[in-house]
Structure formats: structure tokens, C-alpha cells
Amino acid sequence: NTLHTTRKELIPNIAGGCEETTTGVIRLNQMAKDGALQFPMIAVNDTDTKHMFDNRYGTGQSTLDAVFRSTNFLLAGRILVVAGFGYCGKGVAERAKGMGADVIVTEIDPTKALDAMMQGFRVMPMADAAKVGDVFITVTGNRDVLRDEHFAVMKDGAIMANSGHFDIEIDVAWLEQHAVKKNAKMRHQTDEYVMADGRRLLLLAEGRLVNLGAAEGHPASVMDMSFSDQALTAEYLVKEAKNLKAGVHNVPTYIDKEVASLKLKSMGGLIDVLTPAQDMYLNSWEHGS
């Protein structure tokens, strides 16, 4: 935004850029739609070796790690509410289910909600989930996902954490203004807000990204793929920028496959290779139905 608003004179010297995050790509797509984006940007987040692994397995593990470090909470048998069922939300829901939680998913997209249901998760509006949840984790990229109407019906001792983007997914400002008492840092990165009726709501990492604020972020052994995507995409951009129009572009497939192959090899995995007959069959329209 700074480049496109207050430092426009720098734009002619920029070949392009690479965007790592879901939220960043959303903003870039909107800029491109509005005709505001003045140079090519590569959506690294959207390539398979980034969002299928970093977002899903990295976010899933590091988010729950942060909850446990902050609260020493036993997840088994408790109700965990995940707001958002993108790759990050899937990761959180899957990891929580694997640890014995009863997982509820809230969504605004019927396709993602259906996906969650067919994976065995309960799906309902946040207004209903707020009444029964023990732990709430927002992973939406939007604001006010948890707000006053939800705080009003939450259980005493409900735990809230954000693993989506900025500190606006949970309406922290409302809690600050309306809680009758705040016990700051009662545990590691845990603030307790006491409501007028005596209920206590626990907020982790001040509503900021909990896996960074209360834990160590994603393991290096999943971030290596994302950073490999970034490095190889930056090399591609330097070489091809003159051939790319201003706008949002995908990571070339060959880069994605190279990163996947290198990671698979490092983990000791092997795959089959098509026989000549199989390759011919897949590339022919004259065979099969």
C-alpha cells in the first residue's frame, strides 16, 4: 500500500514481488481488480506446496501448541470451535479432532461448510456455537468474528485465540471497554476478562496471531517448502518480469513440483514413474471412454 500511495516514485524500479500469505493475496487480487496494482505479484500462498502444508499442517500444529503452552488445557472430550474452514481452519480442526476434541466449524461458504460436515465435524452459526464452546479459534482473515453478541453467551472460562491474521478477528476493543475487570497475563500470554455477570473469558496473545505470540510459529520442517517457493519464485520473477503484466500471477507449476519432489526425497519418499504406454494413454484422446 505504501508503494502505491505515498512512494509511487519507486514503482518504476520494482520488477515485481512475491506474496506469502492468504490475507496478502486477497488484498492484491482486490488491488488488481480495481486497477491499482502497478507491477506483477506472484501469489506464493496459492501454490500447492505452500497452502497444502504450511497453512494446513503448520497452522494446525502451532496453533494448538500455543493454546496448550498458555493454558495447560486438556483438549480431549472438550468442545473446540473453529471459525473458518480454509486450509488453516482444516489444519486446526483435524489436529484437534485427533486429540479427542468435539470440533464445531463455523463458516460463511456453503461448500466449505459441506466439506467440514462430510469430514465429520459439526457445522453451525457462531451464535449457536458460542453457547457451547470451550475453546474458540478464529482463522478467517476477517474482522469481528467473535464479538459482543457471542461474548454474552459464552461459558465461564471460555478460551479465545486468533490464528487468522490481525488482532481484529476477536473484538478485543469491546472486551477492553466492557469487562468489569481485567487480569492481565494471569498465565503465559493469557488475559482474563471478567464480565458484569461474573463470567471469565480468557484471551490468548492479546488476540494477535496466537501461534506466533504464544508459541514458536510453524516448524522449520514445513516452512522450508514455503521459503523454497519464495526463493525459486523470486528467481523466476527476476528472469521473467519483463514478460509479466501488472497483476497477480500463479507460481509456475514446475517450481511447485520441484519443491514437492525435493521435500519428498528429503523425507525418504519415492513415487512411481509412468510407463511409456501409460503416458501415451493419458495424452491421447483416441483411447478410453
Image: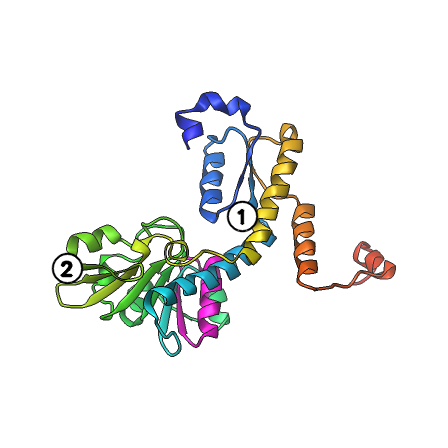
Q: Is residue 163 left or right of residue 127?
A: right
Disc 1 marks a residue whose amino acid type is: Asn
Quick check: 149 left or right of 44? Answer: left
Q: Nearer the viewer, residue 275 or 179?
A: 179
Image spot of residue 212 (x, y percent): 41, 54
Q: Is 274 rendered above or below residue 13?
A: below
The residue wearing badge 1 is: 45
Q: Quadrant of the N terminus?
A: top left
Residue drawn at x 17%, y 63% as measured from the top left:
194
Is any atom of residue 86 visible in this view? no
Give neighbour class at mark 2: few <14, some 14-19, many 20+ (Cα, 10 Å).
Answer: some
Q: How is the image coloured?
A: rainbow
In front of the other: 284 or 228? 228
Is residue 92 at least partly visible in the picture?
A: yes
Q: Residue at x 45, y 73 (%)?
A: 97
- Circle 2 SS class: strand
Mark 1, secondary structure of its residue: helix
Q: Earlier in the sequence, mark 1 or mark 2?
A: 1
Question: In the displayed structure, does residue 110 sit left or right of residue 201?
Answer: right
Residue 49 among those drawn in magenta: no
* Residue span colored magenta: 86-113
Tell me what residue is drawn at x 70 percent, y 47 percent.
254
Where residue 235 sits in the image (x, y, percent)? 64, 37
Q: Which mark is residue 181?
A: 2
Residue extending farthest to the top is: 9
Q: Nearer the viewer, residue 246 or 111?
A: 246
Q: Is residue 271 left or right of 18 when viewed as pictured?
A: right
Image quadrant for the C terminus? Answer: bottom right
**Residue 74: x and y, percent?**
36, 75
**Crowding near pointer 1: few (<14 within 10 Å), some, many (20+)?**
many
Q: Give the amino acid type for the residue marked by disc 2 in the picture.
A: Lys
